[in-house]
Image (tube, grey):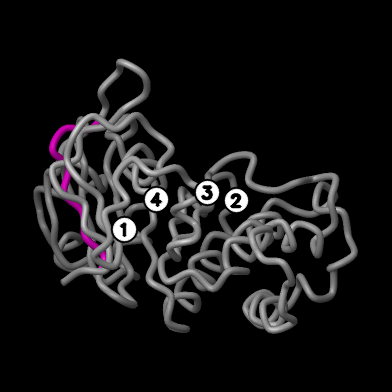
């Protein structure tokens, strides 16, 4: 049984329905990517897992517990971390203070939590006292991901982690995602850089107009002629 199971999900915002009968699954330690054209509902699908949309039907189960429609403050306690695409750091706080915010539900933050993040992102150890608003976009994204790792989640949700990064930093960001997964955290990634993401993941989904269109291994989707022509630029 998959660690995360989304079945027949209908969701949106207010009265606006974006997703129709969407199915997704992530196994333990798996790296899964959601790709598709703009407006396909990729981010909405991810936000729905984390309780940030209007639930309209279907189900979301995590480690066999029904988390459908539950609020984010409950979902994070189940072992799911989430990094939104925008406004995902506190710019006026230091690196260390941002990381502390990621563990706000704990009465006391263990030193091991910081060490895990600093091992993943060594530059953050060097800059732990620096205000995050003065850092580069790539470093800010590391802070956002590090904050989500402070609770040692079983599943990490990443919404467009390469968005807005300079081209020479995109590969580095994907390398970080690879290592997070290799260290035992399952990841579900929404990504516009579809070729790069599918080339690294275990499995991918293609969403179109709020519905499932394709599901397969990442390399199989890259080799699929229809997927290449319609969504990957040939």
Q: Gap in Å between the C-alphas at discs 1 and 2? A: 19 Å
Rendered location of residue 221, percent (x, y): 17, 60
| Circle nearer the viewer, 1 or 3 | 3
Label 4 crowd bin: few (<14), some (14–19), many (20+), radius 10 Å: many
- Residue at image point 38% right, 71% down: 186
| Circle nearer the viewer, 4 or 2 | 4
Residue furthest top as drawn? 15
State the SS at label 3: helix
- Residue 201's tag is none
- Residue at image point 30% right, 35% down: 41
- Residue at image point 20% right, 30% down: 209
- Say whether disc 3 or disc 2 marks the residue closer to the N-terminus: 3
- Say whether disc 4 or disc 3 marks the residue closer to the N-terminus: 3
- Residue 191's tag is 4
User: Is residue 110 shown left or right of residue 25?
Assistant: right
Name the main secondary structure of what is drawn in magenta.
Answer: strand
Q: Which residue is mark 2?
A: 165
Residue 229 is drawn in which quadrant?
top left
- Residue at image point 56% right, 55% down: 167
- Say whether disc 1 or disc 3 marks the residue closer to the N-terminus: 1
State the SS at label 1: strand
Closer to the camera, 74 or 162? 74
Rendered location of residue 105, percent (x, y): 64, 59
Q: Which residue is mark 1?
A: 33
Rendered location of residue 33, percent (x, y): 31, 58
State the SS at label 4: loop
The magenta span reads 19-26
Q: Gap in Å between the C-alphas at discs 1 and 4? A: 7 Å
Q: Are marks 1 and 2 in contact (CB under 8 Å)?
A: no
């Amino acid at each position: 049984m998959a660690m995360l199971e989304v079945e027949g999900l209908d969701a949106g915002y207010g009265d606006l329905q974006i997703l129709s009968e969407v199915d997704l699954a992530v196994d333990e330690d798996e790296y899964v990517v959601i790709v598709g054209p703009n407006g396909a509902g990729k981010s909405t699908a991810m936000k729905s897992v984390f309780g940030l949309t209007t639930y309209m039907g279907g189900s979301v189960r995590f480690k066999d517990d029904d988390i459908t429609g539950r609020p984010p403050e409950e979902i994070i306690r189940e072992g799911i971390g989430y990094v939104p695409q925008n406004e995902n750091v506190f710019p006026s706080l230091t690196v260390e203070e941002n990381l502390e915010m990621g563990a706000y539900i704990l009465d006391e933050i263990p030193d091991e939590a910081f060490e895990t993040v600093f091992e993943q992102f060594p530059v953050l150890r060097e800059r732990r006292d620096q205000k995050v608003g003065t850092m580069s976009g790539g470093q800010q994204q590391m802070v956002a991901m590090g904050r989500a790792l402070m609770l040692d989640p079983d599943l990490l949700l990443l919404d467009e982690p390469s968005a807005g990064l300079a081209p020479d930093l995109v590969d580095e960001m994907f390398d970080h995602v690879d290592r997070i997964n290799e260290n035992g955290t399952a990841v579900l990634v929404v990504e516009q850089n579809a070729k790069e993401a599918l080339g690294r993941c275990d499995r991918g989904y293609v969403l179109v107009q709020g519905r499932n269109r394709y599901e397969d291994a990442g390399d199989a989707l890259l080799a699929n002629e229809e997927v290449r022509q319609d969504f990957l630029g040939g």
